[in-house]
Amino acid sequence: MTAVDGGSRRYPLRLAARDSRSHPEGARQAVAELVGEEGAQVVVTMAGTRVLPAVADACAELGVPCVSTTFPWQAYVFGRGGDTERPFPWTYHFAWGLDDIAVVFAEMWERVGDRRTVGCLWNDDVQGEFLRHPVHGFAPVAAARGHRLIDPGGYREPAVTFADHIRRFVDAGAEIVTSAATVEDLTLFHRQAGQAGLRPRLVTCSRWLAYPRDRAQADALAGTDIATLVYWTPRHPFSSSLDGTGAAELADAYQRETGRPWLQPLGLAHALVEVAAHALATADDPTDRQAVAAAVGRTRLPTVAGLIDFTAGPTPNIALLPLIGGQWQPGRDHPHELALVTNTRFPSIAVDAELTVAPCG
């Protein structure tokens, strides 16, 4: 797509990129350059706990629409000082909720047993704060299903020791550990837990382990049954609103061009561009940023990542994507591949493997 139609005129479409350098200040500088130097009419982003909110806030300050993804919506809304009644004027986000992650993880814990004692390996930063939030977080949803959560408190990244966490988990008899740790911190926990005689039957981990495990990660985490959340795969039955490219075609093209396995964020990155192009094409005036923001707000668009519907909520400026459960298991084409093991939230995608857990004792 190289142009958008706006009324009786056709406008050229140009993509410009800037690197946030994975830092909030770099993110704000990137937005300033995109708006000031490139004349961006809309900014799209997918980033982490501190960078994504910085991009969204910078866009709001400069009066340019922003569309973002890959971040639980409660942290996006409440972490930026929003609420469920007052919409942000410029910024829009599609993803899933901490409650959705809790439901998918709890379903996998329940393959181990109805009510489990679960150790929580959560940091002391914004991410951990929202996971344990008593109203908007992961913890109350998981606890409401009858699971006992053991949260020894946050740890600072990068971690130096997990001795206190491990001792609390052993004392509580936790057979499952849930986490949003980096691979490096999870590896440290795995090593120290083994030395202390703690061998969880299952680890559920979001964040970095939603991505492919390389050989070093696989070796470092050998012997650990790890499950994670799944939000996009080549098997998702969706296609691009731009050119009809299907999820499997998109993944194949990525692998051919890069020589690397497909990534879950691939589909969402493509969907960001789809939403931006749709907003520009349907805005009353694509050169008017307020008109473009209004067009994003009324978007209801089938994309390669699924239906993105900003008119449905759960709160203003938010669109939801469904989650299912996956597990890294030995694969045919790669040492580890993401198998689908639960599909309650999206039954049209069939599971292709049984969840594996370590034996008792």
Image (tube, helix red, strand yellow):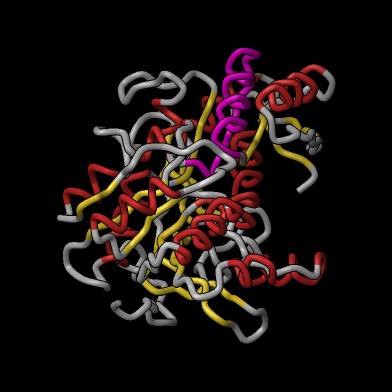
Q: Nearer the viewer, residue 274 or 132?
A: 132
Q: Residue at x 34, y 52 (%)?
A: 167
Q: Nearer the viewer, residue 106 or 172?
A: 172
Q: Please check the rendered image and state whether residue 59 is part of the magenta-colored stretch, yes or no.
A: yes
Q: Residue at x 27, y 73 (%)?
A: 111
Left or right: residue 306 compared with residue 204 = right
Segment tinted magenta in the rendering: 48-71
Q: Residue extending furthest front? A: 196
Estimate the x, y position of residue 67 in percent, counting from the top left.
58, 34
Q: Residue at x 52, y 25 (%)?
A: 294
Left or right: residue 112 compared with residue 13 = left
Q: Residue at x 21, y 62 (%)?
A: 116
Estimate the x, y position of residue 235 in percent, counting from the top left.
53, 72
Estimate the x, y position of residue 101 in percent, counting from the top left.
37, 52
Quadrant assignment for the C terminus: bottom left
Q: Residue 284: in sight, yes or no?
A: no
Quadrant in the picture for residue 85: top left
Q: Residue 79: in sight, yes or no?
A: yes
Q: Nearer the viewer, residue 228 or 89?
A: 228
